[in-house]
Amino acid sequence: MNRLAIALQSIRRESANGNGYAIRWFFTRFHLRFVRKLFPGLPHPTDTDRARPITVVIPATDKDADLLGYCLESVRSQMKQKVVDIWVVAPESERIRALATQHQARFLHEDTILPQPARELKTRGWILQQFIKLNAANHVETDDYLVLDSDTIFLRPQYFFRGGKSVLRYSDQYELLYNRSLELIFGHCCRFPVSFVTHHALFNRETMKQLLSNLEQRFNRPWWTAIQEEVDKCHLISFSEYELYGNFVVNRPNWRKQVVLEYWNGTDLNGTDAANLDEIRATVPPRCNSLSFHRHTQ
C-alpha cells in the first residue's frame, strides 16, 4: 500500500471523531513523522538536565542473555544522564545474574517487582515484562526511571531531559490492536497521531502511579487484573506499556510544559540478525539511535 493510500485510510478512520479532527490528526502526524524527524529543533541538554538522576529498569529472561550484555554495555557507554542504578529484573538465572554483575547492574528477581508473584499472575512473558515496567514505579527511588527492552542497544549518546522537560520519544509504528486496548482504557477512540513504541521510554514515577490508579478506579479492580481481563484478551500483541504511558501523558492538561517529543531514530531487526551485530553497527545511518532485535515469537 503506497503512502497516499495509507494517508487516505487514516483520514477515513479518524473521521469517526469528526472531519476537522481527522484533518488535524493527519497534519500533526505528517509534521511529526517527516518535518520533526529531519528538523528536531530540540533544546540542548543543560548541565541541570544531565544531572537529573534516573534508574534504568531492564526486564530479561534466559533467552535474552545473548543480547543483554550488549544492552547493558550500551547503557554504560551511551547514557549521559546521572544513572543511580541499573536493575536487571528476571526469573532466577545464573547467567543473567552473572551478566548483571559483570556490568555493575543489580539483579532483582521478577517477583520482587511484579504486583504479584509470576505464578499467581498466570499470564504470558509478553505481559509479565510489561507489568514489571509499570509496577517499577512503586519500587524505584528516583523521580524518573528508564525502561528498556533487553534486546535494544543504544548507538549514540542518550539524553532524556532537555530544557527542563522530560523526553518522550515516538516512532512510525502503528499497531491497531494497541489502539483498541487504549480505547478500552481511556474510554474514547482519539489516538495520538504517532506511536510511542520505541522499545525504551522514560517514565515519571508519579505520573505512572496516577495512571495505574486511574485504571483501578475505572475498572474497580487491581490494575493488573483490569489489563488481563479487559485488555489483553489472549492476543500476542494486544497491549503495549509504551502506548499506554505515552497516550496517558499527551492526554493530560498542559502536557507540553512537562515533556518534549523526540523522534526515536531507531531500527527494528529480527532476532536472527543479532549474529551480524558488528556489521550492522558499522553500516547503519549516522542518525540511527538504537537497534532492537525482536524475538517475540521465541
Image (cartoon, rainbow, N blue to C red):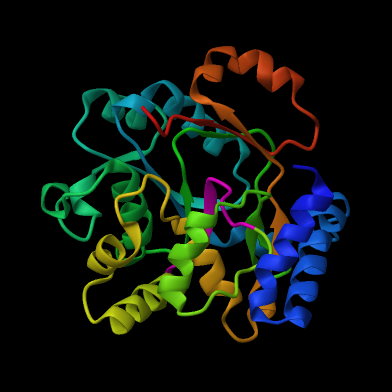
Residue 42 is at least partly visible in this image:
no
Q: Foreground residue, 69 or 25?
A: 25
Residue that appears at 37% across and 44% down: 236
Q: Position of residue 72 (x, y in %)?
A: 47, 33
Up the image or down, 121 lies above or below 63; here it is below
Up the image or down, 103 lies above or below 162; here it is above
Quadrant in the rendering for residue 40? bottom right
Quadrant in the rendering for residue 165? bottom right
Up the image or down, 125 lies above or below 181; here it is above
151 relative position to 231: left or right: right
70 relative position to 11: left or right: left
Q: Position of residue 53 (x, y in %)?
A: 51, 59
Quadrant in the rendering for residue 241? bottom left
Q: Foreground residue, 57 or 262?
A: 262
201 in the magenta segment: yes
Residue that appears at 47% across and 71% down: 183
Q: Position of residue 239 (x, y in %)?
A: 41, 56
Label total for image: 0
Q: Foreground residue, 168 or 1?
A: 1
Q: Foreground residue, 140 or 149?
A: 149
Residue 23 is at least partly visible in this image:
yes
Up the image or down, 297 lies above or below 184; here it is above
Please provide the residue range marked out in magenta. 195-205
Residue that appears at 72% across and 43% down: 265
Q: Position of residue 20 (x, y in %)?
A: 78, 81
Residue that appears at 33% across and 57% down: 232
